[in-house]
Image (spheres, grey):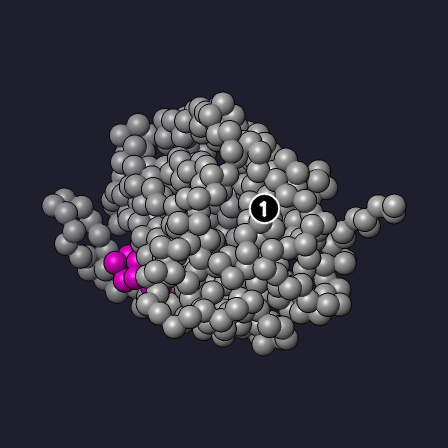
Amino acid sequence: MASEPRPTYRGVLRHDAMPAFVTAGALQFAAPATALVVLIFTIPVGYARAGHPGEGSIALALLGLASALPTLGSAFFAGPLADRHDRHLLLRSANVISLLATAGLAADLFVRPGGSVPLAPGFYFPTWVALALPAWALLISSATVFRPAFNASVPKLVPPAELGRANGLIYAIAAGTSASASLAVGIVLSVGPAVYALAAPFALFLATQVALVGVRADLSAPRPRPTRRIWPDVVEGLRYLWGRRDLFEMTVAALVVNFLVAIAFVELGLYVLVWLRLASGFWYGAMVSASTAGAAVGMLTIAHVRFEHRAGRVLILLVLAMGFAVLGLALVRSVWLALPIVFAYGLLPGMVQTVFLSSVQATVPNEILGRVFSADEVGSYALVPVGQASGGALTYEAGVQGTFLAAGASIVVLGVVMAVGFGALRTLGFEPHAAARGTTPASD
């Protein structure tokens, strides 16, 4: 019997709606990270110029909380919304909110109102930072609503054998776009006002809206959801995740990894400013760009190793390698060594994301897929606010190197625990040429 032809990236784009769909997802996923580059560099610089450099780490931790808490709150309901309603309309509506939130951030940085807001005795909290936090929270909430609806739509457009390449292509373009935009933003931050740099994420959200208009396909769940309260749908997604031990163990691992990564990388701006002793916004943009470029390469290359049958074991190896990469960042003081290490670090989560998304899309029925994605997101990110707050406090007490050493060593230990104790995850995999459960791929 003739073997099945190997999927190609060109073949993914031959499906009717995929070019516009890939463009919309890639640009929308890239835009929030680009806006975050502006905030995560502008805030500590603003504190330094105001004569309060030591308090910048606490302000960055608050920025992290303004991101993580809305992510968790929105994720509870994003999946049920994606399984109940027209996903195409949901995607467009969420992106419009992202556009408005970015405009609000730009207005805040343009006016930059003076004064400070009382927060804690002896702590300086500028008014312009206080106003930026809710705008950023709205932006990240809308992006959270966008993700489950988008990811649950992928198996509606391509067959299981092409899921790895479809996800890799979408997120690699997103990472490449984010890397380019982050580098451009870093240059703008070095030569002009921060508000000009926000033109990049605004343009990405605007282009996303245009691309979504060009998506001509039915993206909704195979069966209409019954009319009932949304909370039982939330519980149903959580119950499914609990019943799938392989996916549950993967979520637990992501919970701990995201907590540890948040401890270190919420302070990346200070890593560049204090540890590498580089005051130019260009170098911060370069670090972010190197990481996202690594993610793009990882997303594109992981499909070539044919991970589908051994997805769980691949995930465990990637987590171990992530820990060693974070340790490497803690041990170098030269940007020319830090850049290749942060590229390697980005490579690994990029691979993890493609393996995770493809495994879930291939093994979960589409009518519950949005809820499973949002349930996993709630579980995976539940400790991120704690990690970000802990990162600010730990950096304040132990310094940048101590924070990165602690996070990296802990991720390595987690990888060992996964290899020894996560038996169900080690068996996770899927048959790429099997019929998808509950999906109807679009015809060419």
Find residue 382 and report its horizontal and vertical position in percent. 35, 45
Residue 238 can be seen in this image: yes
Indicate yes or no whether the magenta region holds residue 131. Answer: yes
The image shows a total of numbered marks equal to: 1
SS at badge 1? helix
Q: Amino acid at mark 1?
A: Ser
Residue 433, magenta (yes or no): no
Q: Tell me what residue is drawn at x 58 percent, y 52 percent.
A: 361
Q: Residues within 10 Å of mark 1 (few under 14, many from 20)?
A: many
Residue of label 1: 359
Q: Relative to 128, say whether 220 is above or below.
A: below
Residue 375 spot, x, y in % from top left: 41, 51
Residue 345 picture location, percent across and down: 54, 36
In the image, is residue 283 above or below residue 99? above
Instruction: Identify the residue at horizontal 61%, vertical 51% (top origin).
Output: 362
Instruction: Specify whether 137 is left or right of 339.
Output: left
The quarter of the picture where the N terminus appears is top right
Q: Quadrant of the C terminus?
A: bottom right
Mostly what secondary structure, the magenta segment? helix
The image quarter containing residue 272 is: top left
Stretch in magenta: 129-138
Q: Nearer the viewer, residue 362 or 72?
A: 362
